[in-house]
Amino acid sequence: MTTANLLVELFVEELPPKALQKLGDVFAGVLHSQLAAQGLAASDAQVTAYASPRRLAAHITGVLAAAPDRAVQHKLMPVAVGLKDGQPTPALLKKLAVLGAGPEAVAGLQRLADGKAEVLYLQSTARGSALAAGLQKALDEAIARLPIPKVMRYQLADGWSSVNFVRPAHGLVALHGSDVVGDVQALGLTAGRATHGHRFEARTEPVLLQSADTYAQQLQDEGAVIASFAERRAEIARQLAAAAAQLGGGVQPIEDEALLDEVTALVERPNVLVCAFEEEFLAVPQECLILTMKANQKYFPLLDAEGRLTHRFLIVSNISPQDPSAVVEGNERVVRPRLADAKFFFDQDRKKTLVSRVPLLDKVVYHNQLGTQGQRTERVRAIARAIGTQLFEALAERHDIDGTQDAEVVQDYLMTCVDNAALLAKTDLVTDMVGEFPELQGVMGAYYAVNDGLPDDVAFAIEDHYRPRFAGDALPRHNVGLVVALADKLETLVGMFGIGNLPTGDRDPFALRRHALGVIRMLIEKDMPLALPALLDAGAQAFGALIDAQAVAPLADFIYERLAGSLREQGYSAQEVEAVIALRPARLALVPQQLDAVRAFAALEQAPALAAANKRVGNILKKAEAEGPVDPHVNEELLREPAEKDLYAALTRFVPEADAQFERGDYTASLQTLAVLRAPVDAFFDDVMVNTDELALRLNRQGLLKRLHQAMNRVADLSRLAV
């Protein structure tokens, strides 16, 4: 079979930059998978995707000119239906005719067993697809399956027809080796070998491709285009680093992978240039300047060795003139009004205090069922006060509040900060700066709080109460910020669950999953001595009659589900996680210690037997408790069998020690202490009948098992470890 490398390119108008890389990968991937499915390409063929602002292309190695013929087996019908006295029935002849075979094929039919019956099969040969036909099918499928953000409809050159695509297409290339794959069409275009290079800097126009393998090199040499997204991205990163290095002083371009991807999708021939703006703009918070340069202009701000913004920035131009001064001056002229706007917003916002903006929140709708941002602020304040009271009292008890001062004074100060931060946390939503740049909410609130002379604890809390914003984001820095962040997220969770606005499999418009994970991370990673039920109760009380308190009940399950998923992602086994989460631990901060204890216990020789016994005990008690609660107290006088006496003695001896270790937080030692119960537990189940007919004896033995079950399952539900 003749093989050669295949190149397919679709030349279009400027593609959406944020979708470009994915469009290129999908285009190449679907082309290859469709050709492989037709036998025209190997499943392990090397596939190279190309994507530039005006093209999607794919290079696939070892593509056949025609797929090999293949044997096909057609199941016809049972022998009893198809043959009567050795002769074909009308039903069989009709079936053969549909498959293109005549009566002469009857003699060659195979008889194969299919269950209890024999079935007739027809063996035939299917001709392999020619490349032109196979590529047409693959190309149609690749275009249909592109993840296009928004389709546009445009008219073709004939003036009558129209097609739907992401952008108007103007060229199609299909080369098998050096030969054009004839008759392949798409979007009103017929395949050829001509493509186009850079709009202004191409050496030849059009670029006539010699073969599939010369595509990238010809585009670079003749068309002044780097076709590969990855190579273009690497070249931009290299030029950015080189330009910063030439400036010296440890200056570095800001790291932003999303911005680098977007700029890569905007240029065909990158050329990095250094620009500057007036240093007076550095008086504006650098977050504002960085955001306006990145979001509006796609520039790369330069930071000094300490991470402070400098007055220089880098641009990625799509042209490379001999004298770049006009390009530099043009970009400096364009960015100046943007920075001036930021400075104006900042200066204007500072003329009003955050406190004076609080009434304006009553005019901002939060949710049609949950009221305004002003009402929401009052709920967050109530939740924050409840959390702060719990937290600071617990910290004072374990001496985590500065011991050099009076504890009550410190607590009063922190509670005042909590209340002020919760009151002012959303006020920057009604500032000009955040109105222009919503991404700066919280950040600008902190700057304005400092401008108003508020304590750093309040300013930090205003900025940090949105944290963590995403997976891996930093947590609030101090306790005041932690309290307000918890209150803010709990208000959202409780409120949305309270009105039945729950996330679905593919929709979570209020980011409830992210909020739940944020609550989990803060409680665990900051070792907060807070109980989840108390937090949820504080959240529900803040809403009063506005929500259905019963509708909030599933919220706890939702949080434990997110916790279980997070723990599995961290490497804990499903059994370990289930064992701990089954107890619905109130203090999430202790969960990692419980998991470590379960893992250590599971490694013990006694663990499998004790887990199985624990499961058996649970089943016995479940049946017994269907008739009423089981009393865990044991009457020693009713202990008759040696095995039950030995188990009771072991419990009496070792459970107090295990309980003391549990109370100290040494969960691993607690479980290992209880591991010695294996022998008396095994003997008990071998020698003692629990559900005896004698009522007093039965209740006493159930009580003994209840006591065992309570002792064994304080750290985790060990029955979940049973195989």
Image (spheres, helix red, strand yellow):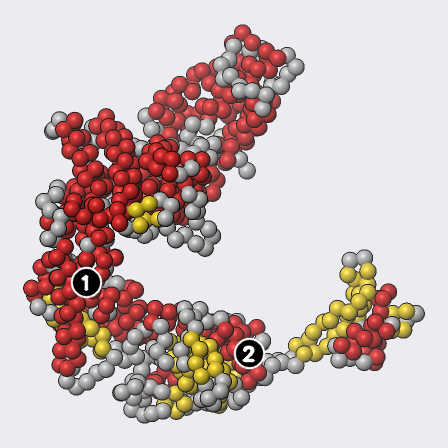
Residue that appears at 30% across and 69% down: 262
Q: Tell me where residue 72 appears, x and y as whole percent.
A: 69, 74
Q: In the rendered view, would you say 409 is above or below 367? A: above
Q: Judging from the image, what secondary structure is the residue with disc 2 in?
A: helix
Q: Residue furthest front?
A: 363
Is residue 485 visible to the viewer in this orientation of the structure?
A: no
Q: In the picture provided, is 560 more to the left or to the right than 121?
A: left
For the C terminus, give its image quadrant.
top right
For the N terminus, give its image quadrant.
bottom right
Q: Tell me where residue 321 appears, x and y as whole percent.
A: 19, 85
Which residue is under mark 2? Answer: 137
- Distance, label 1 to label 2, CA atoms, is 47 Å
Q: Residue furthest left?
A: 280
Q: In the picture provided, is 264 more to the left or to the right than 683?
A: left
- Answer with the quarter of the image where residue 380 lies: top left
Residue that appears at 41% across and 85% down: 170
Q: Residue furthest top?
A: 637
Q: Amino acid at mark 1?
A: Ile
Q: In the rendered view, would you say 396 is above or below 192? A: above
The crowding category of the residue bearing disc 1, from other C-alpha atoms within 10 Å (few below 14, some 14 to 19, many at least 20), is: many
Residue that appears at 24% across and 65% down: 295
Q: Judging from the image, what secondary structure is the residue with disc 1 in?
A: helix
Q: Amino acid at mark 2?
A: Lys
The crowding category of the residue bearing disc 2, from other C-alpha atoms within 10 Å (few below 14, some 14 to 19, many at least 20), is: some
Tell us which disc is closer to us: 1 or 2.
Answer: 1
Q: In the picture provided, is 595 more to the left or to the right than 243?
A: right
Q: Which of the numbered marks, if any, corresponds to residue 290?
A: 1
Q: Earlier in the sequence, mark 1 or mark 2?
A: 2
Foreground residue among 699 and 520: 520
Q: Which of the numbered marks, if any, corresponds to residue 216?
A: none
Q: Tell me where residue 266 appears, x and y as whole percent.
A: 30, 75
Is residue 423 visible to the viewer in this orientation of the structure?
A: yes
